[in-house]
């Protein structure tokens, strides 16, 4: 690993891979850093090693990653897998941990392609062993072929939940029920977005096919479910919910939930980039322009880390951001940049027709984002409940950072990743204020936990 | 808006001043451009240290320590204060010699709070310490508190006695009007008989507006905190010849600091962590506690504090104007002093003089 590159790309998902290929075509020095062992990111996880039968089950979208991974392997980027980026600052200095040695490297341009994480939504019982996020289930399947052996209840909202149900169904996992928390009122708000969504009808068709297949397989699916609770003594034994005005319960040792995905903003937050609340996507994302420039010079963002737009769009955004980086580096002219951007931009726009519809349709109900159940744990690391957060709001001047100081919520080893969004919503709700750009905790580095010895290795590295 | 006393800055210093004034029945308003505790007072390391203070600060620090030991009587909360002592470790004979001289000096001033301990007692108190250490200077009544809790308790008590706090209220401009002051802020103009400048790292700008420029330097100090560990060390640890400040908090986390300075863009209030320095600090910690090597750091941050060239604060009536007072520039150790500073300021404002000796902290000391 060198001390300096013209371009550093963080993340080997579709955005980062496409960016690396484009960049090295122009002969610049470029490093790609990613914490996974192989290229692919979230969607194409283990794309190079998954056996053909598994790839088939994962669907055509997944298989498309093969070509991209091959192009990537053929390009001249310096690729560092199993490399954790633990800091990024406004000077474009990147703190990395590679082979247990920490190091700070720098670049003229940094492209953050860190992708998305599943939106954590606390509900009663969500911390019980036996409750997990659907994405984690999908990761186990993609990377190791592991599937639930004693059946599973799937609950939540969003296309990925449907996709996972369909993938599980094909490999014979017993799906005890699909519980969709999408309220009926979402249909109405989504209706106005429907005409534009028709321009990307292949996504709609795919969704309908998944639903049809699940129905044919006899899988129980309930819409507009509310009051979801996980129950059990020390571990999950059953779940309960309300449907059509009645309480129901299902015995199960495994519940997988999914409430959509949100940008992974820890790196851009650490760098001090400005972030905006996106009310349609119900998340915070780095402010950026059509080239992926953030508010900080030389730091670019592409892919789901910039706002959720899906895999294809991530790939195009990665190419566009690299064109901008090449232009800033003086490698291509403005005219060349504009010329080469026409096609990817057009493609990207097409891909995005579906988003407003999906966002409206799968919007998470407000009372789940800001739970009113006081006993629900919000911060699992420090075991702080929603009630304690609500109680702290007055003394904390309605500022979630000060709620953190007072309650220790968000101060544990996960560094607030699991609770930052929920706290912001609860604080706004309790204070009767609208949620704003600055409602999230301030980012506190390191972006990933480092041991004292790993950090200390930085000073040795520097001295040598 | 009119008030008798306007305090600028709702950190510990402004809040403690408001508390003591309110206890004596004065009407005061504390304004802050952010919110109470947003800066140094909410982000500090929590250390309550008399050990190794500047000689001029010793009388104040000793008085403050007495107040911290009875803090519940003052603010109805124990502020999570604990008193397991603070220690300054010697790693060699030269360290030992310097510490012995220090202890003798403090004794000669008539104070007993700092004493030397040898190797045997050091390892009784801190069995986990690396074996090369040979002795230490100790102050057994020292300890630590949780800063934001302390600040909140001070504020609530002051409020209960009639003080008001206004957040998001930034002072743009201060002008004298007759014997009083007109203070223009982001929330309109305040007219006050008396102003008190407790604006921390920003106090230099306000002092300049009051025609009393001071050589204050804002700096951002870094701290890092680890995951929780089983309890293994009681006192707060420092070292004579190395940058170390290290303590295990009530909940098991370790707070590591020690004069580590971050990059600061003061205009933007932006701080960038300097990892090289934190790495050096991690290495120092491992030299003293090698068993901690696999402990994970979960957060690092920097807080903005005002520093004076001689590293002691300004605690003073204005030398240029009537009815103006200053208390700022605590140079990274103002939490411990904060209760007594409130007391001193109330005496200065209401009685015209302080019972404790504050001549060394005069604002005029930079004039020559
Ligand atoms: C759990 C999960 C499962 C998903 N499954 C699907 C799916 O099956 N189908 C689908 O269409 N969409 C899926 N998505 C949505 C998907 O994220 C995107 O559409 C697509 O992967 C976005 O691509 P990207 O390049 O922006 O980011 P990603 O593909 O997410 O790639 C980002 C990469 O950056 C790495 N990274 C992040 N931070 C750091 C750091 N600090 N140091 C080092 N590396 C870092 C990550 O490990 C990851 O490899 C999933 C999302 C999640 C969260
Ligand atoms: C990282 C760190 C660690 C520390 N560790 C310790 C320790 O262990 N022990 C110890 O005793 N001390 C410690 N200190 C020092 C201690 O925190 C400070 O000395 C003390 O908090 C100073 O209080 P203050 O009220 O002067 O300043 P602050 O808390 O900074 O308050 C000043 C306030 O003034 C406001 N303000 C500024 N300008 C304006 C304006 N124009 N209009 C309105 N409001 C304004 C600010 O918003 C701010 O809230 C540490 C400091 C830091 C940064």
Image (tube, coloured by chain):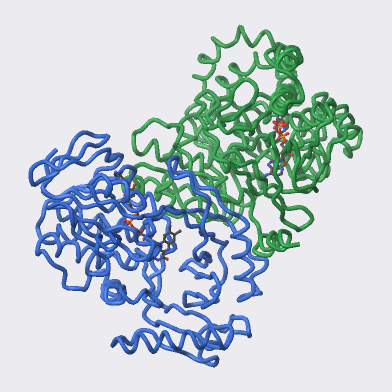
Chain colours: A green, B blue
| B175 to B163, vertically: above or below | above
Residue pushed farthest front?
B368
Tell me, yes or no, if residue A21 can be seen here.
Answer: yes
Q: Provide residue A109's location: percent of width, then percent of height.
A: 69, 34
Q: Provide residue A394's location: percent of width, then percent of height.
A: 31, 45
Q: Provide residue A328's location: percent of width, then percent of height.
A: 69, 27
The quarter of the picture where the N terminus of chain B appears is top left
- Residue shown at the point (31%, 76%) measured from the top left: B58
Residue A42 quadrant: top right
For the residue pair A334 and A431, the one nearer the viewer reads as A334
Q: In this view, does B274 lie to the left or right of B106?
A: right
Q: Provide residue B264's location: percent of width, then percent of height.
A: 49, 48
The quarter of the picture where the C terminus of chain B appears is bottom left
Q: In this view, does B53 lie to the left or right of B9?
A: right
Which quadrant of the picture is home to ligand 2? bottom left
Q: How many marks?
A: 0
Residue B11 quadrant: bottom left
Tell me, yes or no, if residue A57 can be seen here.
Answer: no
- Residue shown at the point (8%, 47%) measured from the top left: B179
For the residue pair A52 and A7, the one nearer the viewer reads as A7
Q: In this view, does A332 lie to the left or right of B27?
A: right
| A238 to B143, vertically: above or below | above
Residue B71 quadrant: bottom left
């Amino acid at each position: 690993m060198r001390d300096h590159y013209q371009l550093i790309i963080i993340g080997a998902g579709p955005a980062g891979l496409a960016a690396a290929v484009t960049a090295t075509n122009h002969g610049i020095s470029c490093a790609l850093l990613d914490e996974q062992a192989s290229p692919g990111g979230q969607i194409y996880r283990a794309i190079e090693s998954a056996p053909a039968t598994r790839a088939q089950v994962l669907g055509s979208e997944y298989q498309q990653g093969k070509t991209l991974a091959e192009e990537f392997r053929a390009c001249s980027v310096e690729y560092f897998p199993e490399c954790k980026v633990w800091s990024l600052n406004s000077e474009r200095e990147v703190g990395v941990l590679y082979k247990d040695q920490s190091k700070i490297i720098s670049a003229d341009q940094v492209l953050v392609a860190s992708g998305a994480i599943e939106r954590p939504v606390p509900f009663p019982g969500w911390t019980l062993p036996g409750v997990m996020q659907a994405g984690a289930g999908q990761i186990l399947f993609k990377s190791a072929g592991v599937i639930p052996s004693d059946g599973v209840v799937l609950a939540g909202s969003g296309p990925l939940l449907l996709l996972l149900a369909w993938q599980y169904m094909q490999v014979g996992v017993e799906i005890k029920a699909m519980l969709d928390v999408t309220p009926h009122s979402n249909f109405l708000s989504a209706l106005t977005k429907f005409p534009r969504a028709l321009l990307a009808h292949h996504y709609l068709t795919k969704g309908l096919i998944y639903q049809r297949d699940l129905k044919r397989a006899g899988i129980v699916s309930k819409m507009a479910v509310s009051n979801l609770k996980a129950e059990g003594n020390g571990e999950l034994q059953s779940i309960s919910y309300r449907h059509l005005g009645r309480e129901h319960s299902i015995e199960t040792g495994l519940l997988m939930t999914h409430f959509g995905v949100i940008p992974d903003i820890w790196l851009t937050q650490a760098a001090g980039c400005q972030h905006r609340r996106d009310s349609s996507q119900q998340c915070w994302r780095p402010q950026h322009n059509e080239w992926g420039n953030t508010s900080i010079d030389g730091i670019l963002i592409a892919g789901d880390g910039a706002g959720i737009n899906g895999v294809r769009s991530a790939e195009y955004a990665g190419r566009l951001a690299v064109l901008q980086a090449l232009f800033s580096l003086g490698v291509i002219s403005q005219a060349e940049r504009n010329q080469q951007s026409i096609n990817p931009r057009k493609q990207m726009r097409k891909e995005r027709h579906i988003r407003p519809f999906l966002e409206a349709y799968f919007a998470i109900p407000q009372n789940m984002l800001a739970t009113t159940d006081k006993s629900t744990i919000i911060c699992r690391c420090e075991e702080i409940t929603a009630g304690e957060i609500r109680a702290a709001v007055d003394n904390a001047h309605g500022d979630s950072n000060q709620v953190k100081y007072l309650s220790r919520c968000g101060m544990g080893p996960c560094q607030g990743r699991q609770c930052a969004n929920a706290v912001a919503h609860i604080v706004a709700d309790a204070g009767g204020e609208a949620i704003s750009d600055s409602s999230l905790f301030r980012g506190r580095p390191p972006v990933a936990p480092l041991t004292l010895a790993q950090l200390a290795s930085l000073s040795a590295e520097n001295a040598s | 808006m009119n008030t008798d006393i306007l305090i600028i800055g709702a950190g510990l210093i402004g809040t403690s001043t408001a508390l003591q004034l309110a206890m004596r029945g004065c009407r005061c308003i504390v304004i802050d451009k952010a919110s109470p505790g947003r800066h140094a007072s909410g982000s500090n390391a929590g250390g309550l240290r008399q050990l190794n203070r500047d000689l001029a600060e010793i009388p104040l620090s000793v008085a403050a320590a007495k107040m911290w030991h009875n803090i519940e009587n003052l603010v109805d909360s124990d502020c999570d204060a604990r008193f397991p002592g603070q220690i300054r470790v010697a790693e060699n004979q030269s360290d030992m010699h310097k510490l012995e001289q220090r202890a003798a000096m403090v004794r000669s001033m008539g104070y007993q709070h700092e004493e030397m301990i040898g190797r045997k007692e050091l390892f009784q108190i801190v069995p986990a310490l690396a074996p090369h250490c040979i002795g230490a200077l100790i102050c057994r009544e020292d300890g630590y508190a949780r800063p934001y809790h302390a600040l909140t308790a001070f504020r609530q008590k002051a409020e209960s006695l009639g003080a008001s706090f206004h957040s998001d209220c930034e002072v743009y401009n201060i002008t004298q009007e007759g014997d009083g002051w007109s203070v223009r802020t982001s929330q309109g103009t305040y007219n006050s008989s008396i102003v008190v400048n407790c604006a921390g790292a920003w106090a230099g700008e306000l002092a300049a507006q009051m025609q009393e420029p001071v050589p204050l330097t804002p700096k951002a100090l870094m701290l890092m905190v680890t995951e929780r560990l089983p309890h293994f060390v009681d006192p707060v640890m420092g070292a004579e010849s190395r940058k170390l400040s290290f303590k295990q908090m009530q909940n098991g986390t370790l707070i590591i600091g020690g004069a580590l300075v971050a990059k600061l863009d003061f205009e933007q209030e932006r701080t960038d962590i300097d990892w090289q320095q934190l790495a050096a600090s991690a290495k120092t910690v491992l030299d003293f506690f090698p068993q901690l090597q696999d402990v994970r750091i979960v957060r690092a941050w920097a807080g903005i504090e005002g520093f004076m060239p001689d590293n002691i604060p300004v605690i003073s009536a204005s030398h240029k104007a009537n009815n103006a007072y200053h208390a700022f520039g605590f140079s990274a150790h103002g939490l411990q002093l904060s209760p007594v500073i409130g007391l001193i300021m109330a005496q200065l404002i209401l009685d015209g003089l302080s019972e404790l000796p504050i001549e060394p902290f005069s604002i005029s000391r930079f004039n020559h």
